[in-house]
Amino acid sequence: MNKILYFGAALVCLLFSSCNDYLNIAPKGNKIPTTLADFEALLRDQYTIGRTPVTNALYLLNDVYLTNSQVNTPSLSRANYMWDESADRIVLNNSDEGTYYVLYGAISSCNLIVENVPTATEATDAERNEVIAYAKVIRALCYDVLVNYYADTYDAATAAEKRSVPLITSAEIDAPYTQVSIQDMYDFIIQDVKEAIEMGLPAKSMTAIHPNLGAGYALLARVYLQMQNYSEALRYANLALEQNDQLYDWNAFYEEHKTALDDPDNYDKIATPMQYDYVENYYLRLGEQSVYDSYEKNIPVERAARFEEGDARFLSRWKLKTDNNDTYYKALESGYFNHGGLTTCEVYLIKAECQARLAEGNDYSEAMNTLNAVRITRIRSEVYCPAEASTLEEALSLIRRTKDNELIFSIVPFADARRYNQEGTYARTLTKTYEGQEYSLSPTSHLWTMPFPAGALNNPGNGTIEQNVTK
Protein backbone atom coordinates (compact mmCIF):
# COMPACT_ATOMS: atom_id res chain seq x y z
CA MET A 1 0.00 0.00 0.00
CA ASN A 2 3.01 2.24 -0.42
CA LYS A 3 1.26 4.33 -3.06
CA ILE A 4 -1.14 5.82 -0.48
CA LEU A 5 0.09 8.82 1.46
CA TYR A 6 -1.11 9.47 4.98
CA PHE A 7 -3.35 12.39 5.92
CA GLY A 8 -1.38 15.53 6.62
CA ALA A 9 1.69 14.46 4.57
CA ALA A 10 3.38 17.09 2.47
CA LEU A 11 1.81 15.87 -0.75
CA VAL A 12 3.58 18.43 -2.87
CA CYS A 13 6.83 16.66 -1.97
CA LEU A 14 5.60 14.02 -4.40
CA LEU A 15 7.91 15.09 -7.20
CA PHE A 16 9.51 18.41 -6.53
CA SER A 17 11.84 17.84 -3.59
CA SER A 18 14.17 15.12 -2.44
CA CYS A 19 11.64 12.99 -0.58
CA ASN A 20 12.85 9.94 1.29
CA ASP A 21 11.23 6.51 1.30
CA TYR A 22 9.94 6.99 4.83
CA LEU A 23 7.09 9.05 3.38
CA ASN A 24 5.70 5.79 2.03
CA ILE A 25 5.08 4.60 5.58
CA ALA A 26 2.34 6.04 7.73
CA PRO A 27 3.74 7.21 11.08
CA LYS A 28 2.06 6.29 14.32
CA GLY A 29 -0.99 8.38 15.04
CA ASN A 30 -1.81 9.04 11.37
CA LYS A 31 -4.65 7.39 9.53
CA ILE A 32 -4.34 5.55 6.25
CA PRO A 33 -7.39 6.43 4.10
CA THR A 34 -9.45 3.36 3.30
CA THR A 35 -13.14 4.34 3.33
CA LEU A 36 -14.75 6.70 0.84
CA ALA A 37 -15.30 9.17 3.68
CA ASP A 38 -11.54 9.12 4.35
CA PHE A 39 -10.75 10.06 0.77
CA GLU A 40 -13.58 12.57 0.42
CA ALA A 41 -12.23 14.41 3.47
CA LEU A 42 -9.23 15.43 1.34
CA LEU A 43 -11.58 17.54 -0.78
CA ARG A 44 -12.62 19.54 2.29
CA ASP A 45 -9.12 20.65 3.23
CA GLN A 46 -9.21 24.08 1.61
CA TYR A 47 -5.67 24.99 2.56
CA THR A 48 -4.28 21.92 0.77
CA ILE A 49 -6.63 21.49 -2.17
CA GLY A 50 -8.87 24.56 -2.40
CA ARG A 51 -6.61 27.54 -3.18
CA THR A 52 -5.29 29.15 -6.38
CA PRO A 53 -2.65 31.78 -5.61
CA VAL A 54 -1.56 33.61 -8.77
CA THR A 55 0.42 36.34 -7.05
CA ASN A 56 2.76 37.45 -9.78
CA ALA A 57 0.10 37.46 -12.48
CA LEU A 58 -1.78 39.97 -10.33
CA TYR A 59 1.36 42.07 -9.90
CA LEU A 60 2.04 41.99 -13.65
CA LEU A 61 -1.49 43.27 -14.34
CA ASN A 62 -1.09 45.83 -11.52
CA ASP A 63 -4.33 44.49 -10.05
CA VAL A 64 -2.76 44.43 -6.56
CA TYR A 65 -1.08 47.44 -4.97
CA LEU A 66 2.62 47.22 -4.19
CA THR A 67 3.74 49.77 -1.61
CA ASN A 68 6.52 52.25 -2.33
CA SER A 69 8.86 50.41 0.04
CA GLN A 70 8.16 47.14 -1.79
CA VAL A 71 8.76 48.77 -5.17
CA ASN A 72 12.15 49.94 -3.97
CA THR A 73 13.17 46.43 -2.86
CA PRO A 74 14.50 44.05 -5.57
CA SER A 75 12.19 41.04 -5.80
CA LEU A 76 10.21 38.93 -8.24
CA SER A 77 7.08 40.86 -7.31
CA ARG A 78 8.77 44.19 -8.02
CA ALA A 79 10.10 42.96 -11.40
CA ASN A 80 6.61 42.02 -12.52
CA TYR A 81 4.87 45.04 -11.00
CA MET A 82 7.28 47.51 -12.63
CA TRP A 83 7.43 45.57 -15.93
CA ASP A 84 11.20 45.29 -15.65
CA GLU A 85 12.24 43.31 -18.72
CA SER A 86 15.91 43.51 -17.72
CA ALA A 87 15.30 41.61 -14.47
CA ASP A 88 16.32 37.96 -14.33
CA ARG A 89 13.13 36.53 -12.88
CA ILE A 90 14.60 33.03 -12.89
CA VAL A 91 17.22 34.17 -10.40
CA LEU A 92 14.67 36.17 -8.42
CA ASN A 93 12.34 33.17 -8.27
CA ASN A 94 14.72 31.22 -6.04
CA SER A 95 12.26 30.24 -3.34
CA ASP A 96 9.10 28.14 -3.22
CA GLU A 97 6.70 30.07 -5.41
CA GLY A 98 3.14 29.50 -4.29
CA THR A 99 1.35 29.01 -7.59
CA TYR A 100 3.48 26.01 -8.50
CA TYR A 101 3.60 24.24 -5.17
CA VAL A 102 0.04 24.88 -4.03
CA LEU A 103 -1.48 23.68 -7.30
CA TYR A 104 0.71 20.59 -7.59
CA GLY A 105 -0.14 19.83 -3.97
CA ALA A 106 -3.83 19.93 -4.91
CA ILE A 107 -3.15 17.76 -7.97
CA SER A 108 -1.39 15.24 -5.74
CA SER A 109 -4.48 14.94 -3.54
CA CYS A 110 -6.67 14.57 -6.62
CA ASN A 111 -4.39 11.86 -8.03
CA LEU A 112 -4.62 10.01 -4.73
CA ILE A 113 -8.41 10.08 -4.96
CA VAL A 114 -8.64 9.12 -8.64
CA GLU A 115 -6.25 6.19 -8.17
CA ASN A 116 -7.59 4.76 -4.92
CA VAL A 117 -11.27 5.60 -4.58
CA PRO A 118 -12.32 2.80 -6.98
CA THR A 119 -11.42 0.37 -4.16
CA ALA A 120 -12.54 2.55 -1.25
CA THR A 121 -14.76 0.79 1.26
CA GLU A 122 -18.16 1.64 2.72
CA ALA A 123 -19.59 3.12 -0.48
CA THR A 124 -21.62 2.33 -3.57
CA ASP A 125 -20.17 2.61 -7.07
CA ALA A 126 -22.22 5.77 -7.67
CA GLU A 127 -20.82 7.36 -4.50
CA ARG A 128 -17.27 6.47 -5.49
CA ASN A 129 -17.79 7.91 -8.97
CA GLU A 130 -19.08 11.16 -7.53
CA VAL A 131 -15.94 11.69 -5.45
CA ILE A 132 -13.69 10.78 -8.39
CA ALA A 133 -15.61 13.25 -10.56
CA TYR A 134 -15.01 16.06 -8.06
CA ALA A 135 -11.28 15.26 -8.04
CA LYS A 136 -11.07 15.21 -11.84
CA VAL A 137 -12.64 18.66 -12.18
CA ILE A 138 -10.38 20.12 -9.48
CA ARG A 139 -7.32 18.52 -11.10
CA ALA A 140 -8.31 19.89 -14.51
CA LEU A 141 -8.82 23.38 -13.11
CA CYS A 142 -5.38 23.29 -11.46
CA TYR A 143 -3.74 22.26 -14.71
CA ASP A 144 -5.63 24.98 -16.59
CA VAL A 145 -4.12 27.58 -14.25
CA LEU A 146 -0.62 26.08 -14.45
CA VAL A 147 -0.53 25.93 -18.24
CA ASN A 148 -1.79 29.51 -18.49
CA TYR A 149 0.81 30.70 -15.99
CA TYR A 150 4.05 28.86 -16.79
CA ALA A 151 3.66 28.12 -20.52
CA ASP A 152 2.97 30.24 -23.57
CA THR A 153 -0.68 30.84 -24.31
CA TYR A 154 -2.54 28.41 -26.53
CA ASP A 155 -1.96 28.79 -30.28
CA ALA A 156 -3.29 26.00 -32.47
CA ALA A 157 -0.38 26.47 -34.88
CA THR A 158 2.31 25.82 -32.27
CA ALA A 159 0.57 24.07 -29.35
CA ALA A 160 1.76 20.61 -30.39
CA GLU A 161 5.42 21.68 -30.40
CA LYS A 162 5.72 24.00 -27.39
CA ARG A 163 6.28 22.68 -23.86
CA SER A 164 3.75 23.26 -21.11
CA VAL A 165 4.11 21.94 -17.55
CA PRO A 166 4.67 18.51 -15.96
CA LEU A 167 1.65 16.23 -16.36
CA ILE A 168 1.40 14.07 -13.25
CA THR A 169 -1.44 11.57 -12.85
CA SER A 170 -0.01 9.18 -10.27
CA ALA A 171 0.04 9.51 -6.48
CA GLU A 172 3.13 7.33 -6.15
CA ILE A 173 6.16 9.06 -4.68
CA ASP A 174 8.58 8.21 -7.50
CA ALA A 175 6.11 8.11 -10.38
CA PRO A 176 7.63 9.21 -13.71
CA TYR A 177 6.12 12.16 -15.52
CA THR A 178 6.55 14.20 -18.70
CA GLN A 179 6.56 17.91 -19.40
CA VAL A 180 3.97 17.55 -22.13
CA SER A 181 3.13 19.86 -25.00
CA ILE A 182 0.57 22.62 -24.62
CA GLN A 183 -1.80 20.68 -26.90
CA ASP A 184 -1.43 17.50 -24.85
CA MET A 185 -2.18 19.43 -21.67
CA TYR A 186 -5.33 21.01 -23.09
CA ASP A 187 -6.46 17.62 -24.38
CA PHE A 188 -5.94 16.15 -20.91
CA ILE A 189 -7.86 18.96 -19.20
CA ILE A 190 -10.84 18.55 -21.52
CA GLN A 191 -10.77 14.76 -21.18
CA ASP A 192 -10.67 14.96 -17.36
CA VAL A 193 -13.71 17.24 -17.19
CA LYS A 194 -15.71 15.27 -19.74
CA GLU A 195 -14.98 12.04 -17.89
CA ALA A 196 -16.12 13.68 -14.67
CA ILE A 197 -19.41 14.64 -16.31
CA GLU A 198 -19.86 11.13 -17.70
CA MET A 199 -19.18 9.65 -14.24
CA GLY A 200 -22.11 11.55 -12.83
CA LEU A 201 -20.82 14.92 -11.63
CA PRO A 202 -23.92 15.98 -9.68
CA ALA A 203 -26.10 18.99 -10.43
CA LYS A 204 -26.05 19.68 -6.68
CA SER A 205 -22.69 18.94 -5.12
CA MET A 206 -21.98 18.00 -1.51
CA THR A 207 -20.87 21.53 -0.58
CA ALA A 208 -19.86 24.79 -2.25
CA ILE A 209 -16.23 23.60 -2.28
CA HIS A 210 -17.16 20.53 -4.32
CA PRO A 211 -17.54 21.41 -8.05
CA ASN A 212 -21.02 20.67 -9.40
CA LEU A 213 -22.17 19.89 -12.93
CA GLY A 214 -22.41 23.59 -13.73
CA ALA A 215 -18.75 23.91 -12.73
CA GLY A 216 -17.78 21.18 -15.18
CA TYR A 217 -19.58 22.95 -18.02
CA ALA A 218 -18.18 26.33 -16.94
CA LEU A 219 -14.61 25.03 -16.92
CA LEU A 220 -15.03 23.57 -20.40
CA ALA A 221 -16.40 26.92 -21.59
CA ARG A 222 -13.33 28.67 -20.13
CA VAL A 223 -10.90 26.20 -21.72
CA TYR A 224 -12.52 26.28 -25.16
CA LEU A 225 -12.55 30.09 -25.08
CA GLN A 226 -8.81 30.05 -24.36
CA MET A 227 -8.40 27.80 -27.39
CA GLN A 228 -10.45 30.29 -29.44
CA ASN A 229 -13.02 27.59 -30.15
CA TYR A 230 -15.97 29.94 -29.76
CA SER A 231 -18.73 27.56 -30.85
CA GLU A 232 -17.78 24.95 -28.24
CA ALA A 233 -17.22 27.61 -25.59
CA LEU A 234 -20.68 28.99 -26.27
CA ARG A 235 -22.25 25.54 -26.15
CA TYR A 236 -20.78 24.77 -22.74
CA ALA A 237 -21.55 28.26 -21.45
CA ASN A 238 -25.22 27.69 -22.28
CA LEU A 239 -25.14 24.28 -20.59
CA ALA A 240 -23.65 25.85 -17.46
CA LEU A 241 -26.28 28.58 -17.40
CA GLU A 242 -28.99 25.94 -17.67
CA GLN A 243 -27.68 24.63 -14.36
CA ASN A 244 -27.51 28.06 -12.69
CA ASP A 245 -28.00 31.50 -14.23
CA GLN A 246 -28.42 33.58 -11.07
CA LEU A 247 -26.61 36.90 -10.65
CA TYR A 248 -26.13 38.71 -7.36
CA ASP A 249 -27.70 42.16 -6.96
CA TRP A 250 -24.73 44.35 -6.02
CA ASN A 251 -26.87 47.46 -6.23
CA ALA A 252 -28.97 46.15 -3.36
CA PHE A 253 -25.83 45.30 -1.36
CA TYR A 254 -24.49 48.83 -1.88
CA GLU A 255 -27.79 50.36 -0.77
CA GLU A 256 -27.75 48.23 2.37
CA HIS A 257 -24.30 49.51 3.36
CA LYS A 258 -24.43 52.93 1.69
CA THR A 259 -23.98 55.04 4.83
CA ALA A 260 -20.71 53.38 5.80
CA LEU A 261 -19.46 53.06 2.22
CA ASP A 262 -20.04 56.74 1.44
CA ASP A 263 -18.25 57.88 4.58
CA PRO A 264 -14.69 58.75 3.44
CA ASP A 265 -13.26 58.09 6.90
CA ASN A 266 -14.97 54.76 7.55
CA TYR A 267 -12.82 51.76 6.64
CA ASP A 268 -14.60 49.24 8.85
CA LYS A 269 -14.74 45.80 7.27
CA ILE A 270 -18.00 44.55 5.79
CA ALA A 271 -18.75 40.85 5.36
CA THR A 272 -18.51 39.96 1.68
CA PRO A 273 -21.42 38.24 -0.04
CA MET A 274 -18.94 36.29 -2.22
CA GLN A 275 -18.70 33.38 0.19
CA TYR A 276 -20.04 29.84 0.40
CA ASP A 277 -23.68 30.74 -0.23
CA TYR A 278 -23.03 33.24 -3.03
CA VAL A 279 -25.75 32.67 -5.62
CA GLU A 280 -23.25 32.89 -8.49
CA ASN A 281 -21.12 29.97 -7.29
CA TYR A 282 -20.67 26.82 -9.31
CA TYR A 283 -17.55 25.99 -7.32
CA LEU A 284 -15.98 28.04 -4.54
CA ARG A 285 -12.19 28.09 -4.48
CA LEU A 286 -10.01 30.57 -2.65
CA GLY A 287 -7.56 32.68 -4.62
CA GLU A 288 -4.65 34.65 -3.15
CA GLN A 289 -5.94 34.42 0.38
CA SER A 290 -5.54 31.35 2.54
CA VAL A 291 -8.04 30.05 5.05
CA TYR A 292 -6.18 32.14 7.63
CA ASP A 293 -6.48 35.45 5.77
CA SER A 294 -9.98 36.85 5.45
CA TYR A 295 -9.35 40.12 3.60
CA GLU A 296 -9.11 41.16 -0.03
CA LYS A 297 -6.14 42.99 -1.54
CA ASN A 298 -5.71 46.73 -1.99
CA ILE A 299 -5.56 48.03 -5.57
CA PRO A 300 -3.63 50.89 -7.26
CA VAL A 301 -5.32 54.20 -8.06
CA GLU A 302 -4.76 53.69 -11.79
CA ARG A 303 -6.39 50.26 -11.59
CA ALA A 304 -9.42 51.67 -9.80
CA ALA A 305 -9.88 54.13 -12.67
CA ARG A 306 -10.61 51.23 -15.04
CA PHE A 307 -13.85 50.35 -13.27
CA GLU A 308 -17.03 51.60 -14.87
CA GLU A 309 -18.64 54.70 -13.37
CA GLY A 310 -21.27 53.77 -10.80
CA ASP A 311 -20.04 50.18 -10.40
CA ALA A 312 -21.68 49.18 -7.10
CA ARG A 313 -19.43 46.15 -6.81
CA PHE A 314 -16.37 48.40 -6.89
CA LEU A 315 -17.91 50.98 -4.54
CA SER A 316 -18.69 48.19 -2.07
CA ARG A 317 -15.17 46.75 -2.06
CA TRP A 318 -12.59 49.56 -2.11
CA LYS A 319 -12.16 53.13 -0.87
CA LEU A 320 -9.40 55.67 -1.49
CA LYS A 321 -6.86 55.90 1.34
CA THR A 322 -3.50 57.57 1.95
CA ASP A 323 -0.95 56.13 4.38
CA ASN A 324 2.18 58.28 4.58
CA ASN A 325 3.70 58.02 1.08
CA ASP A 326 1.23 55.45 -0.22
CA THR A 327 -2.10 56.31 -1.84
CA TYR A 328 -4.27 53.40 -2.97
CA TYR A 329 -7.77 51.94 -2.79
CA LYS A 330 -8.12 50.04 0.45
CA ALA A 331 -10.08 46.79 0.55
CA LEU A 332 -13.30 47.03 2.58
CA GLU A 333 -14.66 43.50 2.66
CA SER A 334 -13.77 40.47 4.75
CA GLY A 335 -14.63 36.81 4.40
CA TYR A 336 -13.62 33.95 2.11
CA PHE A 337 -13.75 35.03 -1.51
CA ASN A 338 -14.40 32.87 -4.56
CA HIS A 339 -11.45 34.19 -6.58
CA GLY A 340 -10.19 30.78 -7.68
CA GLY A 341 -13.39 29.00 -8.61
CA LEU A 342 -16.15 29.22 -11.19
CA THR A 343 -19.18 31.51 -11.24
CA THR A 344 -22.20 32.36 -13.32
CA CYS A 345 -20.84 35.85 -13.96
CA GLU A 346 -17.78 34.48 -15.72
CA VAL A 347 -19.96 32.23 -17.83
CA TYR A 348 -22.25 35.11 -18.86
CA LEU A 349 -19.18 37.01 -20.05
CA ILE A 350 -17.76 33.98 -21.88
CA LYS A 351 -21.12 33.65 -23.59
CA ALA A 352 -21.16 37.35 -24.50
CA GLU A 353 -17.73 37.17 -26.13
CA CYS A 354 -18.64 34.04 -28.07
CA GLN A 355 -21.86 35.65 -29.28
CA ALA A 356 -19.87 38.67 -30.44
CA ARG A 357 -17.24 36.54 -32.17
CA LEU A 358 -19.88 34.44 -33.94
CA ALA A 359 -22.23 37.32 -34.78
CA GLU A 360 -23.34 37.72 -38.37
CA GLY A 361 -23.93 40.95 -40.22
CA ASN A 362 -22.38 43.17 -37.55
CA ASP A 363 -25.32 42.47 -35.26
CA TYR A 364 -23.92 42.41 -31.72
CA SER A 365 -27.25 42.85 -29.97
CA GLU A 366 -27.29 39.33 -28.48
CA ALA A 367 -23.79 39.76 -27.08
CA MET A 368 -24.72 43.13 -25.60
CA ASN A 369 -27.92 41.71 -24.10
CA THR A 370 -25.86 39.05 -22.33
CA LEU A 371 -23.34 41.63 -21.14
CA ASN A 372 -26.10 43.95 -19.93
CA ALA A 373 -27.69 41.13 -17.93
CA VAL A 374 -24.55 41.33 -15.77
CA ARG A 375 -24.13 45.10 -15.83
CA ILE A 376 -27.66 45.92 -14.70
CA THR A 377 -27.01 44.06 -11.42
CA ARG A 378 -23.81 46.05 -10.89
CA ILE A 379 -24.14 49.60 -12.25
CA ARG A 380 -26.05 52.18 -10.23
CA SER A 381 -29.43 52.96 -11.77
CA GLU A 382 -28.73 56.70 -11.93
CA VAL A 383 -25.84 56.16 -14.38
CA TYR A 384 -26.74 52.84 -16.02
CA CYS A 385 -27.12 52.80 -19.80
CA PRO A 386 -27.37 49.59 -21.84
CA ALA A 387 -24.10 48.86 -23.64
CA GLU A 388 -24.25 48.97 -27.44
CA ALA A 389 -21.68 48.06 -30.09
CA SER A 390 -21.55 48.46 -33.86
CA THR A 391 -18.21 46.71 -34.42
CA LEU A 392 -16.54 43.61 -33.04
CA GLU A 393 -13.78 45.73 -31.55
CA GLU A 394 -16.32 47.82 -29.62
CA ALA A 395 -18.18 44.71 -28.41
CA LEU A 396 -15.02 42.97 -27.21
CA SER A 397 -13.76 46.10 -25.49
CA LEU A 398 -16.99 46.47 -23.52
CA ILE A 399 -17.10 42.79 -22.59
CA ARG A 400 -13.44 42.74 -21.59
CA ARG A 401 -13.82 45.80 -19.37
CA THR A 402 -16.56 44.14 -17.37
CA LYS A 403 -14.81 40.77 -17.28
CA ASP A 404 -11.47 42.16 -16.13
CA ASN A 405 -13.24 44.00 -13.31
CA GLU A 406 -15.60 41.21 -12.31
CA LEU A 407 -12.86 38.57 -12.16
CA ILE A 408 -10.09 40.68 -10.67
CA PHE A 409 -7.76 38.60 -8.41
CA SER A 410 -8.45 35.45 -10.45
CA ILE A 411 -6.33 33.89 -13.21
CA VAL A 412 -8.92 34.89 -15.83
CA PRO A 413 -7.89 38.50 -16.68
CA PHE A 414 -4.26 37.34 -17.02
CA ALA A 415 -5.22 34.40 -19.25
CA ASP A 416 -7.55 36.62 -21.31
CA ALA A 417 -4.83 39.24 -21.80
CA ARG A 418 -2.43 36.55 -23.02
CA ARG A 419 -5.11 35.23 -25.38
CA TYR A 420 -5.78 38.68 -26.86
CA ASN A 421 -2.03 39.30 -27.10
CA GLN A 422 -1.50 36.04 -28.99
CA GLU A 423 -4.39 36.79 -31.34
CA GLY A 424 -2.82 40.16 -32.12
CA THR A 425 -5.81 42.03 -33.50
CA TYR A 426 -7.07 43.24 -30.13
CA ALA A 427 -3.79 43.17 -28.17
CA ARG A 428 -3.12 45.99 -25.72
CA THR A 429 -0.02 47.70 -24.41
CA LEU A 430 -0.36 48.37 -20.69
CA THR A 431 0.84 51.78 -19.48
CA LYS A 432 1.21 53.59 -16.15
CA THR A 433 2.97 56.50 -14.51
CA TYR A 434 5.06 55.99 -11.38
CA GLU A 435 6.79 58.92 -9.68
CA GLY A 436 6.55 60.95 -12.87
CA GLN A 437 8.05 58.28 -15.12
CA GLU A 438 6.13 56.43 -17.82
CA TYR A 439 6.16 52.63 -17.92
CA SER A 440 4.70 50.21 -20.46
CA LEU A 441 4.24 46.48 -20.98
CA SER A 442 4.17 45.25 -24.56
CA PRO A 443 1.77 42.45 -25.54
CA THR A 444 4.81 40.59 -26.91
CA SER A 445 6.88 40.87 -23.73
CA HIS A 446 8.44 37.70 -22.29
CA LEU A 447 7.01 38.77 -18.91
CA TRP A 448 3.64 37.29 -19.88
CA THR A 449 5.00 33.78 -19.18
CA MET A 450 6.06 33.11 -15.59
CA PRO A 451 9.31 31.25 -14.79
CA PHE A 452 9.28 27.92 -12.97
CA PRO A 453 10.58 28.27 -9.40
CA ALA A 454 14.12 27.13 -8.63
CA GLY A 455 12.94 24.32 -6.38
CA ALA A 456 11.06 22.64 -9.22
CA LEU A 457 14.07 22.80 -11.53
CA ASN A 458 16.61 21.71 -8.94
CA ASN A 459 14.52 18.83 -7.54
CA PRO A 460 12.46 17.60 -10.48
CA GLY A 461 11.74 14.11 -9.13
CA ASN A 462 11.43 11.28 -11.63
CA GLY A 463 11.32 13.48 -14.70
CA THR A 464 12.84 16.58 -16.25
CA ILE A 465 11.64 20.18 -16.38
CA GLU A 466 12.88 22.73 -18.88
CA GLN A 467 12.41 26.44 -18.19
CA ASN A 468 9.89 28.06 -20.54
CA VAL A 469 11.41 31.57 -20.41
CA THR A 470 14.94 32.94 -20.75
CA LYS A 471 14.66 35.30 -17.78
Image (cartoon, rainbow, N blue to C red):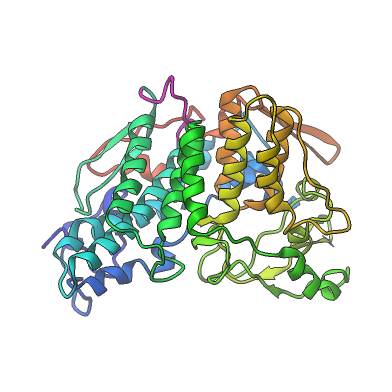
Relative to 236, say whether 276 is above or below: below
Q: Nearer the viewer, residue 149 or 29?
A: 149
Residue at far left of view: 1
| Residue 424 x %, y % | 61, 22
Q: Tell me the magenta residue range.
A: 151-160
> Going 22% across and 71% down the picture, which residue do you hit?
36
Question: Which residue is depicted at the point 39% across and 25% down?
Answer: 162
- Write the residue at 61% across / 45% down: 349
Magenta stretch secondary structure, dominant: loop
Image-based side of 3 in relation to 302, left or right: left
Nearer the observer, 42 or 466 = 42
Q: Position of residue 247 (x, y in %)?
A: 63, 60
The outermost residue toward the top is 157
Q: How many marks?
A: 0
Q: Is residue 65 visible?
A: no
Answer with the quarter of the image where residue 116 lies. Answer: bottom left
Left or right placement of residue 110 versus residue 85 in this view: left
Instruction: Classify residue 415 by image quadrant.
Output: top right
Q: Residue 237 versus residue 292: which sits nearer the camera?
A: 237
Give left or right: position of 421 versus 286: right
Q: Quadrant of the N terminus?
A: bottom left
Residue 373 visible? The answer is: yes
Vertical relation: 461 (above or below) 381: above
* Residue 40 lies in the magenta stretch: no
Residue shown at the point (56%, 32%) measured from the top left: 419
The correct choice, above or below, for 162 with respect to 258 in the image is above
Where is residue 302 shown, x and y percent of the image? 79, 45
Which residue of the protein is positioned furthest toward the bottom in this rendering? 29
Q: Position of residue 165 (x, y in %)?
A: 37, 38
